[in-house]
Image (spheres, rainbow, N blue to C red):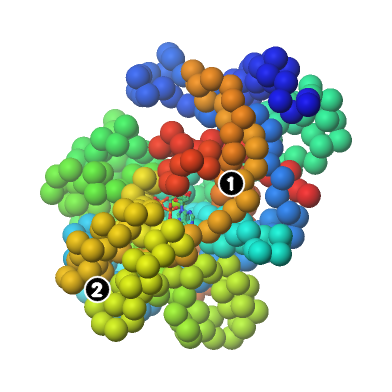
Amino acid sequence: MFWNNIIIFGKLAEVAKDAALLHGVLMRTQETPMSSELVSYAPFTLFPTPVPKAVFHQALAVQTFYNTLVDKISQDSEFLQEALASTIAVDDFTARLFKIHQMILKEGKSQDIVLGLNRSDYMLDQGGDGTSSLKQIEINTIAASFGGLSSRTPDVHRLVLTVAGRKEESQQILDNNPAAGLARGIAKAWELYGAPRAVVMFLVEESQRNIFDHRFVENELWKRKHVFYSHLSDGQEVAVVYFRNGYMPQNYISEQAWDARLLMERSLAVKCPDINTHLAGTKKVQQVLAKPGVLERFLPDHPEAVQQIRATFAGLYTLDMGAEGDKNIAMALATPDRFVLKPQREGGGNNIYGTEICQVLEAVKESSERTAYILMDKIQPTPQQNYLLRRDAPLKISDCLSELGVFGTYVRQGTHMVMNECVGHLLRTKSSEHQDGGVAAGVAVLDNPLLI
Ligand code: ADP
Ligand code: MG
């Protein structure tokens, strides 16, 4: 079969890699992560993956509702406090973030412009009747990645399909430009800040090294609540701080790093995200949202939004102390393969599956340590065959699972929503033998949906 002809596919893979280089689907290498001399292509699938049209459009349609929801949660400190109470009692990282939130609450926010750039991730759960339903994995309210690369992958798959003689399918690959939509949000926030010489500061990851410690200066003008970027020679005023860093405990290797986060949070700069929005994206909040009546609290006059959001929820279960938590633990211990156990972490590779769920739960079930986790139904998508192109990996066909992400941008000033948009999508695909892990973790690769 054409499908399994390794010679043809080997040639096609070479064409695909060249196209990736040509279109800027690039990544720095692990050996030389700081080098601009040596880069490689970012891993991607040889072919786009079929995705049912209806669920794809469902995911796009619910995004502006998710934007509104996240924004409303971020403004409800009482809710955040209640939802996160059991978590912060045992999870130091979330507790420290929460402490900053409380300090700002006491001092009063210095900036009423809010910029949200998020990505809601989904998998398609396979129903018994052959249909698939859209289920949210999580929403990322900080450092939602791949808006840039996913703007460039459509041209690669178009070329591959054209060369493979599938011209018609190649024309069905959707245009996608989340980078432009995310940038529009940043530009709008900068404009509203209203200081033409002020800059946008991107706090980037430098191979997970903490960069909070340097690059800021506190000088006289700090008294007027501006934050300055010392990396630029004259200490530029910052209008917008974008956090591509700061979402993992490892990003805060010193007290100075926490001081820097607080400094930025107190500053007049527009934070993306601000501390409230960061906390609104925690997995514990996701679990609490699935409880009856909670969505209605945030969207009381929008039953349609509530219904559309709730339709994307998988089963989410509390492990808080008490009868309900006990029942959920018993359920997980009895059928661990039906669930995923999640700590309050971001960045991939932290979740717990299968028999390891039993080991962890047996160890923590009698203590409040268990409240550091939430339990979630495991989504079971139908595997699809594809070739994962990754540097130095042999070309072989794999059973693959895909995760669809949808990017949202919003800007609010005071009570006025200035912008609320769905700005694009991301499809990531991994071999079904891996339970967890994203592109950066070296497990998933970039992909495009082919709507069917
Ligand atoms: P992170 O913040 O680390 O990205 P996620 O909740 O996105 O955490 O989980 C990481 C990965 O684990 C996902 O990309 C997905 O592959 C897998 N995963 C997470 N939740 C589920 C689930 N409920 N069912 C199946 N796979 C899941
Ligand atoms: Mg994720």
**Residue at image point 73% right, 17% down:** 8
Q: Is residue 235 left or right of residue 304?
A: left
Disc 2 under 8 Å from ligand 1? The reply is no
Q: Furthest residue to the front?
A: 334
Question: For the residues carrying marks 2 and 1, which lies nearer the camera in this image?
Answer: 1
Q: Which residue is mark 1?
A: 402
Residue 184: x and y in percent read 57, 49
Q: Secondary structure at mark 1?
A: strand
Mark number, residue 14 = none
Residue 373: x and y in percent read 30, 64
Label 1 environment density (alpha carbons within 10 Å; few <14, some 14–19, many ≥20): many
Label 2 environment density (alpha carbons within 10 Å; few <14, some 14–19, many ≥20): some
Residue 72: x and y in percent read 46, 74
- Snapshot quadrant of residue 299: bottom right
Disc 1 under 8 Å from ligand 1? The reply is no
Q: Furthest residue to the right?
A: 168
Q: Closer to the camera, 186 or 60?
A: 60
**Residue at image point 52% right, 67% down:** 314
Residue 423: in sight, yes or no? yes
Q: Closer to the camera, 330 or 78?
A: 330
Residue 281: in sight, yes or no? no
Give amino acid for label 2.
Answer: Ser
Give amino acid for label 1.
Answer: Ser
Q: Which residue is mark 2?
A: 86
Residue 135: x and y in percent read 57, 62
- Examine the rendered structure and indicate whether residue 260 appears above or below residue 420: above
**Residue at image point 84% right, 25% down:** 165
Of pointers 2 and 1, the one earlier in the residue sequence: 2
Q: CA distance from mark 2 to mark 1?
A: 33 Å
Q: Secondary structure at mark 2?
A: helix
Check the picture and name the quadrant holding the N terminus.
top right
**Residue at image point 62% right, 66% down:** 62
